Amino acid sequence: MNHVTVGRMTLISLLIMTAAVALAEPATVTVPADPPATRTVELVEQWRIGGEDDEDILLGVIFDAAVSSGGNVYLIDRQLSQVLVISPEGELVATLGRQGEGPGELNQPHGLLLLDDEKIGVIQGFPGKVTVINPDDTPGGEIHIGGPPEEGGFNFVRELDRCGDHLVGQRGRATFDMETGKSVSTNTLAVMDMEGNDLAVIVEHTQESDLQRNVFDEKAQFSELDEWAIGPDGILYTAPVRDAYTINARNLDGEMVRTMTREFKPRHRNEEDKQELTSGMVIIMNGVRQEIENKALDNDPAIMGLDVADDGRLFVQTCFDQDKLLETGTAGRFDVISPAGEFIEQLTLSVPDFDGDKDRLVFLDGVSFLVIRSFDQAQQAMMAGFGDDEEEDDDLGDAEPLEVVYYRMP
């Protein structure tokens, strides 16, 4: 009798353990190849600043933006090293920060974070740090990203976002060997506390470069951390496979929640497409522009953009959604996926006269968006002093002034 009881209990225990293991495995969600619905929405303009007709606000190159719960829009100006605060009505509320290396000062910042108590965190790429500025424009300290200098090499920050009391971002560290002329850089996608200390490392990618050979090696450069986004629910999305529509979803501990896949064939490139990949790269040595060896791949990456709305919806841009492939007047096209992995719709955003060769769409919260008019020309003008192409510099003299237009979904 006892022997039978033990046998039954062992069988039950095995069943429970098997079920627990099955539940622990991340789910795989197959996204339909064809969108269940398609929708085109014409965005509604709320305000605009800059451009030829605005004599009150001077804009350099607006590189990033964020919108607060109260409707204020924060614009980071990389060229002028300052943050503009714009009210919901389109009025300039404040200008925060200034060029410099001291407390509260900025040096070519490229991103920003909204912190508690209306503080602003401004992201500087090198050396990697976040400069905190109080709403009254006084210094609020710094958050150092990527470890102390004594670890060797130099640290940098590419992207950074906030999720509750966590920072999530892509940062790195690079070293250079003077004898061999080679550089080794390690890029890391990590979850950090609000002081910049690592809590979880999600993905790391290490690459060696020979600075005596200027090579664009697309295969070697690809990594899962190239495209990522964090949602308000603490779900971190990445694209782990270059040539496939595959999206990993993890929690802030790095544990895999689900993998989403979709039948998809990436766009094939022609030779002109491949050459365009290095046409904007500038390497100057001793005042002379260097030639770059182009080792571009035959296909575009399947996924070329990930964003998450405030309600948790994931917005995915594929290689067929690039600005250069969209017709004039189309500012963006997205696959919209629910937090549970359900394909909701393919959404196209329409903006009159939007030109993908000149203008840039900035995703804010899934309801509001920015269009930066003449962005490419403004960025090229900012970088013109580093080149040696006088004819190209002359062409930039006719560039239209940068303009920022704020839109919302109807």
Image (spheres, rainbow, N blue to C red):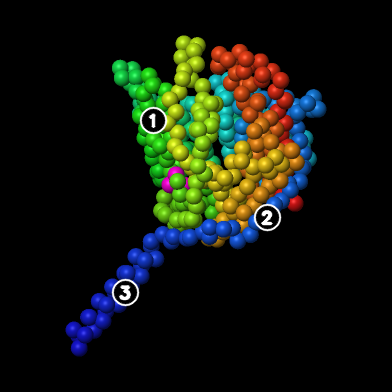
Pick the residue in front: 210 or 321.
321
First-in-chain label (2 vs 3): 3
Q: Amino acid at mark 1?
A: Ser
- Percent of width and height locating residue 133: 60, 31
The residue indicated by pointer 1 is 185
How many numbered discs, if any? 3
Quarter holding the N terminus is bottom left
Q: Amino acid at mark 2?
A: Arg
The residue indicated by pointer 3 is 15
Neighbor class of circle 1 (other Cα within 10 Å; few <14, some 14-19, many 20+) is some
Instruction: Read off the magenta span.
Output: 238-242
- Percent of width and height locating residue 2: 20, 85
- Percent of width and height locating residue 33: 53, 57
First-in-chain label (1 vs 2): 2
First-in-chain label (3 vs 1): 3
Q: Secondary structure at mark 2?
A: strand
Check residue 39 in the rendering and tell me which mark sits there, or answer none: 2
Q: Is residue 230 above or below residue 281?
A: below
Q: CA distance from mark 3 to mark 1?
A: 47 Å
Q: CA distance from mark 1 to mark 2?
A: 42 Å
Q: Is residue 51 left or right of residue 309?
A: right
Neighbor class of circle 3 (other Cα within 10 Å; few <14, some 14-19, many 20+) is few
Pick the residue in front: 61 or 116.
61
